[in-house]
Amino acid sequence: MSYCTAIAYMSDERRALHKAYHDKLYGFPIDDDNELFCRLVLEINQAGLSWETVLKKEVSFRKAYDNFNIEAVAAYTEADRERLLADAGIIRNRLKVNAAIENAKTILVLQKEHGSFKQWLNFHHPKTKEEWIKLFKKTFKFTGGEIVNEFLMSTGYLLGAHDENCIIHQEILKTQPMWLKTV
C-alpha cells in the first residue's frame, strides 16, 4: 500500500501527523542544505523503525541537532555525542548519532567542492536508484538502499513519493522536481 493510500486508513490523530508531511514536504524539492541534511538524518534514524516514530520526534531532533545546522553538527565533540545518546527525545542509537556527525563533516567537504550539498546532488543527477545507492554508500555513513531511496524520493530526485492519482503529485509536478529532468 502506498503512503498516499495508507493515510486514508489511519486514525484522525495519526492522519494529522502524517498528512502535514505528506502534503507539504514529501517529494518536494529542498533548496536549503541544512534541510537536506535534516531529511538525511531523519531517514537514517527511521531505519528499523516507523516513519511515524520519526515524525513524532522531529521537533526534538531539531532541538538536539541545532536545527540541523551542518557546521554546528560537524563541530560536535564527544560530549555532544554523549548528550545526544542521553536525549530521550530522539533515537538514541550510537551508529545513527555518529553517522549524523560524520555526514555533516562530509557535507562540509562537498559544499567546498561543489558550492552546496544540493549542487553536489544536482551534479550527480540523473542516476538510477542503484547508482545513487553506490554513490551514497561510498560518500556517507549509514546509508543503505532504503535510506537512500527514501531520501531521494522525499527530496524530488527519484520518482515515487506519490501515486500519480494523488493530488499532491500534481503539486509536485509544478515544482519541476529533478526526476523530471533526465539530462
Image (spheres, rainbow, N blue to C red):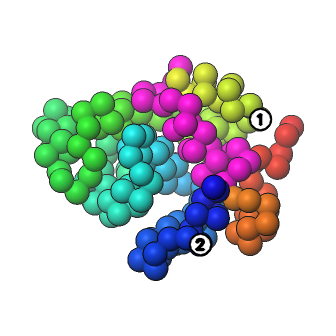
Q: Which of the pair 125/159 is nearer the observer? A: 159
Q: Can you see residue 116?
A: no
Percent from the top left, x then y, of residue 91?
28, 47
Q: Which residue is mark 1?
A: 126
What is the number of callouts on the image?
A: 2
Q: Residues within 10 Å of mark 2 (few under 14, many from 20)?
A: few
Q: Is residue 109 part of the magenta span, yes or no?
A: no
Q: Is residue 72 left or right of residue 80?
A: right
Which of the two marks, 2 or 1, is nearer to us in this view? 2
* 53, 141: nearer the viewer: 53
Q: Is residue 183 left or right of residue 144?
A: right
Examine the rendered structure and indicate whether residue 23 appears above or below residue 133.
below
Q: Which mark is residue 8?
A: 2
Position of the C terminus, as image quadrant, is: top right
Which quadrant of the structure image shows residue 165? Answer: bottom right
Residue at x 26%, y 38% (from the top left corner): 93
Amino acid type, mark 2: Ala
Looking at the image, residue 169 lies above or below residue 132? below
Which stretch appears magenta?
Answer: 138-161
Label located before the other in sequence (2 or 1)? 2
Q: What amino acid does circle 1 point to?
A: Pro
How crowded is the residue under tag 1: few (<14 C-alpha within 10 Å), some, or many (20+)?
some
For the point 38% across and 51% down, the residue is 68
Asked if residue 151 is among those painted magenta in the image, a careful observer would answer: yes
In this image, 134 relative to 129: left or right?
left
The residues bearing labels 2 and 1 have C-alpha atoms spaced at a distance of: 33 Å
Residue 144 position, x and y percent, is 50, 29
User: Measuring 55% from the left and 37% from the top, which residue is drawn there?
Assistant: 146
Q: Quadrant of residue 81?
A: top left
Where residue 57 appears, x then y in whole percent?
32, 59
Q: Nearer the viewer, residue 14 or 73?
A: 14
